[in-house]
Image (spheres, grey):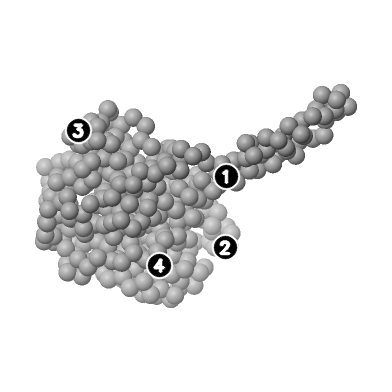
Amino acid sequence: MELEAQWWTGQLAADIHQALRYKELKLPSYKGQSPQLHLRRYFADLIAIVSNRFRLCPAARHLAVYLLDLFMDRYDISTQQLHVVALSCLLLASKFEEKEDSVPKLEQLNSLGCMTNMNLVLTKQNLLHMELLLLETFQWNLCLPTAAHFIDYYLSIAVHETDLHDGWPMVCLEKTKLYMAKYADYFLEVSLQDHEFLNYAPSLVATACVASSRIILRLSPTWPTRLHHLTAYSWDFLVPCIERLLIAHDNDVKEANKQKGQQAQSAQHAVFQAPAPSAQQANAQQHVPQYLQAHQSSLQYHHSASQQQSCQQILSSTHTASYPLQTCPAALQTSAQARGHVQTGTAMSLAVPLEVKPCISVSYNRTYQVNGRYSCVTPCFER
């Protein structure tokens, strides 16, 4: 966001961070009781796609989804009307976080494919009415911190030259910082997909995104003292949220590998269904089917044995000293129990419009265990 040009590096960074932490203590409660909760993932993805199309900042995108969550939690809304609510939340969030010329126009919203498919046409009066209803619901207060508001401040010291990669000094500090930023952005988007992340404070989600990125990149120490002090979160307090993020990451990797396998099988099927040879080729190719039958197993798509090797690394919870959290309410200090696998399969279908970062597409051959329970696939880090 240009208006906040790197506030996290200025002299007021600590004061701004403290103000955001104070405001997150007063965030409205979320109960997850919306009758349309099963549609929440679709509209969160819709907001993400539209915000990326108009190149809105992450803070606007996350604020829009948060406004939608709170509004759905309080009202029973029809599916058709939810499209208007979702776009109105995005408009309000963009007006609050972006410059005026970056806010989507009414004509642009009406040209969206989802509006055409639903036979919906937004009018100025309808949008004004919905925006007023949203503002009255939130008592005209849109200063609601999200994880996107904290992530840049924490990323500013997420990687240091004293960190080790696989126990060795880093070859390229700048490249490591780039990978860290990309993975933190990925985990930040993962947190939008599941409403369960609303059970955690936004600053905790942002901190867990940084910690998960360090795990994926195999940086040590996993949770250095500098991040411990800056975020005021101990490792034990972060583990439940980290587990949920890494499970989602693991599901995304499995889905990507599954799609890759299906594409390979389709390509292989096309090879075997080649057109019949001409009369001139018949004599030369008469032994080809026998050859293919004898070597068919070697042509089938499979994962190499080397990709199945795993490096079991148990992340100890005793490597950080106890550090009390002074600014977090007691209600947030209870560790949330893991609730099974996060449904993230749909995210892969949005990979193209959401511009999945290239670091996600590298080969995967390592696993880590968080708290000794969940095995999470991690990628090779090409130095």
Q: In the rendered structure, find residue 161 and report the number of the disc placed on it.
A: 3
Which tag, 2 or 1, sits closer to the chain's start? Answer: 2
Marks 3 and 1, how far apart in space? 39 Å
Which tag, 4 or 1, sits closer to the chain's start? Answer: 4
Placement of 365 over or under 110, stated as above or below:
above
4 or 1: mark nearer the eye: 1
Which tag, 3 or 1, sits closer to the chain's start? Answer: 3
Label 1: few (<14), some (14–19) or many (≥20) C-alpha neighbours in 10 Å: some
Seen at 82% across and 29% down, the residue is: 286
Marks 2 and 1, how far apart in space? 34 Å
4 or 3: mark nearer the eye: 3
Placement of 262 over or under 322, stated as above or below:
above
Q: Between residue 363 and residue 367, name the one nearer to us.
A: 367
- Residue 157, horizontal then vertical, whole percent: 19, 41
Q: Quadrant of residue 233?
A: bottom left
- Residue 361, horizontal then vertical, whole percent: 45, 40
Amino acid type, callout 1: Gly
Marks 3 and 2, how far apart in space? 52 Å
Amino acid type, callout 2: Met
Placement of 339 over or under 184, stated as above or below:
below
3 or 1: mark nearer the eye: 1
Amino acid type, callout 4: Met
Quarter of the picture containing the C terminus is top left
Q: Which residue is mark 1?
A: 261
Label 3: few (<14), some (14–19) or many (≥20) C-alpha neighbours in 10 Å: few
